Image (cartoon, rainbow, N blue to C red):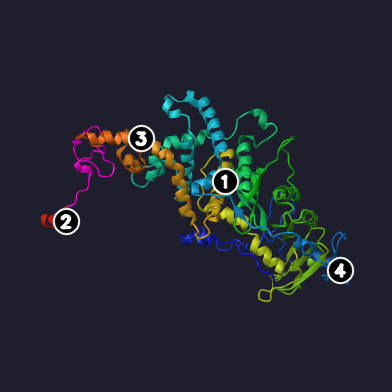
Amino acid sequence: MASFIVPRPISQFLDEIPDEKEILKDVSSGEENDFDPDPETVSDCDYPSEQEASSDSEDENLELGSYDEYFLSRDKSCKWEKQNHIQTLQESNSANFLKPESSAIQVSSEIDAFLKLIDDKMLNSIVINTNHKINIKRNQYKRDRDAQNVTKNELLALFGLLFLIGVNKGNHTGAYELWTTDGTGIAMLRACMSNKRFSFLLRHLRFDDEKTSKRKIDKLSPIRFFLDSFIANCKSSYTLGQFVTVKKLDIFQGQSSSLIRKKLASGIKLFVMCDALTYFTSNLEVCAKQPDGPYQLSNRPADVVERLVAPVEGSNRNLTIGSWYTSYSLARALLRKKITSIGTVSKNKPEVPLEFSPNRKKAVGSSVFGFREDATMVSYVPKPNRSVILLSTMNLANIVDEKSKKPLIALHYDMSKGAVDAVDMLCKAYFVDRDTSQWPLALFFTLLNIASVNAQILYESNREDCRVIRKKFLKNLALSLMKNHLSERAKILTLPTEIRAVLAKYRVETVEKKENLESRKRGRCHLCTRTRNVCTTIRCRSCVRFTCRAHVETTAVCFECKYEKNDEDM
């Protein structure tokens, strides 16, 4: 019996919230879905070939193409041997290749891992294009301070606020409620920036130059530079392991306003390739119908898969795909590029023999195998009147697990198919998206979610002795992103007292300022408002600033204890 890969349980990421464990029970099990044969419809459901068969079904009335030694496909172009007499290509060539192992770039902290994926060039581009948009709209504001340009530190702080709001499950809570001062809001949000500033930055956030000429040849031009740079950084930051998965990832599914959900039908989706064991997203592309030009790409399943796996060609990796992608022609094309594959197949594919279709006469737990020199096909019956058809170019032969009665091909597929679903669930556990009518911003929120998952994997890859809970990781990442901006904001003396109290630990006092404070014997309390203007000689032991009796803590000590302490010191 061959050994199986063991993906990392998602509960290690989300170990502290019981209700999240319920929604992440088993991403590898999948629900039974009907296959959509329409090639224009993007649907890559798990086990779509599990379809009910009746006694008067079309398949039972068709003439079977089986012979003593082989099964004949529907189009009568493929012969599938009943016995495995031929050594597979993977078995003959496996000795010439080393099994690839996953590896990550060196990072030292949460923010360091994040900035490997969203680097300075990307941040500077956002700052430049956002400020250009603000300059255009500045005339619409009466006060200049309501339309100030954004800085790099403030942009990072905005990302930190989005992560912090996501950690507190407030991604669909109104900004007014999050910034409220009645005690139910989040104090750190008010300390970082005002509600108006937060909404202002999100409205004017831009990722590329808004030129109409670009949109004539590229519909993704508003976010093209950010998207391409992010994908390039993901590829260079992490080396995928031996097993990878390709699947569709919906951007807006039930997570945005009704206006955005209407656009879902127009094909705004992501095709994602990620590591089947660690869930690191290495390559992706947006499914969009482009006009004629250099950015026009085919959305045929085989073309999508070949573009996504191009970075790992010739690496002897194994690819797990759904029925929307799987075909015998694609499997052979991948094998020529030294990539083995495994995936479910729809029963109406021309290369599938009629004997592999669902049939009520088949016993539950039975399997039918067909072999070619470069592929193996199996039809497994998990339930009455249902069957699962899988195609594999791996050397798994006709081995059947004695306990579950499942073929080894089906077990391997179950173990590796749920990687993209796991990424989707990790993103949705602490979503950073906000309701918006701008599709580039909605796509940016999805990329920000994927970046946070990848950053955690990079961080943990450099800390093999310790696994980090996702909620804790996102909190530390959010505070690290906001730190520089909080330090700058702590220098503002006109902020409300409660905000200055939160920012006290981010205040950096220079040596000269401390010496000037120590030379003075009396000063105004830094926590009292200007209307009170209380002067005092009491200083804080930590920050050496003047503080009145109303804002200090005193400890009552009797004379005996005081003298005993003095005697001990002597």
Is tag 4's residue or tag 3's residue first in the polypeptide sequence? 4
Identify the residue under disc 4: 70
Q: SS for tag 1?
A: helix
Residue 294 place in picture, x, y as percent: 73, 36
Q: SS for tag 2?
A: helix
Is tag 1's residue or tag 4's residue first in the polypeptide sequence? 4
Number of other residues with Cα within 10 Å of mark 1, as a class: few under 14, some 14 to 19, many 20 or more: many
Q: Nearer the viewer, residue 286 or 553?
A: 553
Residue 73: assigned label: none
Residue 23 place in picture, x, y as percent: 53, 60
Of the two numbered discs 1 and 3 in the rendering, the one whose residue sits closer to the viewer: 3
Identify the residue under disc 3: 491
**Numbered range of the magenta stretch:** 526-555
Q: Indicate the quadrant where residue 287 lies.
A: top right
Q: SS for tag 4?
A: strand
Q: Amino acid at mark 3?
A: Lys
User: How far apart are labels 3 and 2 at the CA level?
Assistant: 39 Å
Identify the residue under disc 2: 565
Q: Is residue 21 left or right of residue 520?
A: right
Residue 361 place in picture, x, y as percent: 76, 73
Residue 366 place in picture, x, y as percent: 74, 73
Identify the residue under disc 1: 446
Q: Indicate the quadrant where residue 525 lies.
A: top left
Q: Amino acid at mark 4?
A: Tyr
Q: 225 above or below 165?
A: above
Q: 72 above or below 205?
A: below
Of the two numbered discs 4 and 3 in the rendering, the one whose residue sits closer to the viewer: 3
Task: Assess whether mark 4 and mark 1 are in contact (beta carbons under 8 angstroms).
Answer: no
Q: Amino acid at mark 2?
A: Lys
Q: How many marks?
A: 4
Task: Assess whether mark 3 and mark 1 are in contact (beta carbons under 8 angstroms).
Answer: no
Quarter of the image containing the C terminus? bottom left
